[in-house]
Amino acid sequence: MNPTQRHAIAAALLASATLATAQNSFGGGGSAPSPSPSPQGGFPAPAPQRAEPNPGAPADLDRLMAQERQDFGVPPESRLHTGAMHGPTPASIPGGQVITTKGLIALVQGRQAPFLLFDVLGSHEMLPGAIPAAGAAQPGSFDDNVQQGFGAYLEQATRGDKRTALVFYCQSTQCWMSYNAALRAIKLGYANVLWYRGGIEAWKAAGQPMQRAQRNEQRAP
């Protein structure tokens, strides 16, 4: 992310909601469970929270950035990925931006730049402060029930502000789940969609902390 892009995102972030966590119908474990959207948008409101950076275990973030931006020769597509969810991914995403671990740590540490962080993997652990959103990884179309439910949830989570920065991640540069979720958000009109392509593997490589995933026990009516 170049300085101009980072400045533009930071400016938008200053007007957005604080970093949040929530249990919602897109959460839970397993591989992208089907959501149960509510016509009335009955999703719990996110609770304000911020992730604390790990002051130890310094990493070479520039070297890690090169790995996170590795080009596997896979062309970016505006369509939802329908193949295997684990395999080489594109180095960019149409309508959004790739954020690296270095950029995400800067957002976490900056404190003047709130954002929403979405875990699209649905495993037993997640980045601190992340919102479960595994269901948004599902293939399909941009007018299906998943899109409708995800749109209702994002509307509530962002309080209707489509300038809010949304960060999506899954396992690694070999995971398409967060790519699909990010595309869904882009198609919903969100202007600052950030795809954390390196995902959990890059975050751990940088010596950053994880937290135990909170299982979703309640579904939207």
Image (tube, grey):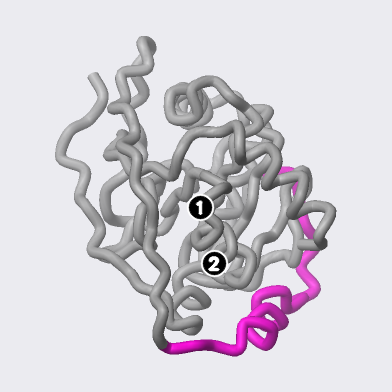
Which residue is denoted by mark 1 in the rendering?
Answer: 111
Viewer-proximal residue among 82 and 75: 75
Packing grade of label 1 (10 A; few <14, some 14-19, many >=20) is some
Which of the image's four quarters has the C terminus? top left
Quarter residue 103 falls in = bottom right
Q: Mark 2 or mark 1: which comes first in sequence? A: 2
Name, please, the residue furthest toward the top. Answer: 40
* Residue 202, percent from left and from top: 52, 77
Q: Which residues are magenta?
A: 57-79
Please give the name of the residue rendered at 69% of the width and 83% of the height, measured from the top-left corner: 62
Quarter residue 157 falls in = top left
Residue 39 as seen in the image, left or right of residue 216: right
Please give the name of the residue rendered at 61% of the width and 40% of the height, measured from the top-left corner: 13
* Residue 53, percent from left and from top: 42, 69
Which dot, 2 or 1, sits closer to the camera? Answer: 1
In magenta stretch: residue 68: yes
Please give the name of the residue rendered at 70% of the width and 46% of the height, measured from the top-left corner: 9
Which residue is denoted by mark 2 in the rendering?
Answer: 105
Residue 184 in view in this figure = no
The correct choice, above or below, for 151 with respect to 171 in the image is above
Prevailing secondary structure of the magenta residues: loop
Residue 113 in view in this figure = yes
